[in-house]
Image (tube, rainbow, N blue to C red):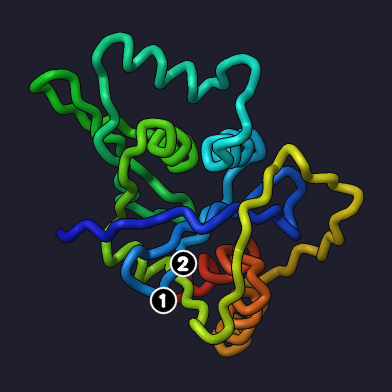
């Protein structure tokens, strides 16, 4: 199967789940976005890796892993998001030490945090993008800036109530998905997308 390269578009604070973030991956040569719900710690680690001006005074966990791996000549070659099961993304890290190559299972958020630090490419497969990708029309797309999770002030965010998508029909779900993508509420879009996937 052909690997499809992804880039990181940004991180958005969850509007429906306290302490959660949506990591937005972008198809390199196409319009599809892949929203992945991640925790606050991983979001902070990814944001710090993206923002070159931020230098934590002590190594974060992902920095420690990278420093240790490099000390022993281990390099992360690439990350592959290879499976989506019940709304959970599964990833593999392809690591190399001299002529030895190993595949290591990892949470997608951890794998991407490490990929940024090793400057390793991120890939997925067509069937993952078909199943979980969302499309934002070019003429409607606006610049999506990375939000630093350390700057988030929860009391200033407007929280919308969690919607029971299981009670909605497919047409309503498709409309809700389109609206969520237009509003760049990717975490909500991911939840709606997962509900649609269950019906198909």
Of residues 2 and 98, the one drawn nearer to the viewer in this rendering: 98
Q: Which residue is drawn at 33% across and 52% down?
A: 83
Of residues 29 and 157, the one drawn nearer to the viewer in this rendering: 29
Of residues 196 and 25, the one drawn nearer to the viewer in this rendering: 25
Q: Residue at x 36, y 37 (%)?
A: 119
* 34 vs 175: above or below: above
Estimate how packed mark 1 is, as few (under 14), some (14 to 19) or many (20 or more) residues with alpha carbons within 10 Å: few
* 11 vs 106: above or below: below
Task: Work out which residue is located at the far bottom of the displayed protein and give it.
Answer: 171
Give the residue number, with chain letter if any, for mark 1.
200
Numbered mark located on residue 33 in the image? 2
- The quadrant of the image that shows the N terminus is bottom left
Q: Nearer the viewer, mark 2 or mark 1?
A: 2
Marks 2 & 1, CB-CB < 8 Å contact: no
In the image, taking residue 164 as reference, residue 115 lies left or right, namely: left
Q: Which residue is drawn at 48% across and 73% down?
A: 134
Q: Where is residue 102 in the image (x, y as percent from the top left)?
A: 19, 27
Task: Work out which residue is located at the far front of the displayed protein and give it.
Answer: 53
In the image, taking residue 90 as reference, residue 195 lies left or right, namely: right
In the image, taking residue 122 as reference, residue 189 lies left or right, namely: right
* 191 vs 51: above or below: below
């Amino acid at each position: 199967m052909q690997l499809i390269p992804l880039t990181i578009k940004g991180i958005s604070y969850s509007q429906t789940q306290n302490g959660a973030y949506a990591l937005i991956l972008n198809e390199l040569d196409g319009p599809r976005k892949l929203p992945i719900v991640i925790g606050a710690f991983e979001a902070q680690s990814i944001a710090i890796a993206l923002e070159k001006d931020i230098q934590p005074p002590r190594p974060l966990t992902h920095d420690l892993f990278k420093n240790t791996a490099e000390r022993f000549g281990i390099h992360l070659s690439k990350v592959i998001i290879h499976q989506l099961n019940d709304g959970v993304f599964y990833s593999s890290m392809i690591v190399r030490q001299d002529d030895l190559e190993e595949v290591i299972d990892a949470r997608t958020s951890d794998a991407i945090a490490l990929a940024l630090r090793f400057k390793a490419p991120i890939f997925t497969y067509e069937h993952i993008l078909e199943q979980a990708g969302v499309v934002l029309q070019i003429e409607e797309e606006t610049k999506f800036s990375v939000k630093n999770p350390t700057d988030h002030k929860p009391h200033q965010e407007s929280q919308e109530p969690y919607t029971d998508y299981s009670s909605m029909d497919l047409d309503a779900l498709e409309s809700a998905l389109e609206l969520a993508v237009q509003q760049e509420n990717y975490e909500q879009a991911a939840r709606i997308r997962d509900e649609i996937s269950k019906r198909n």
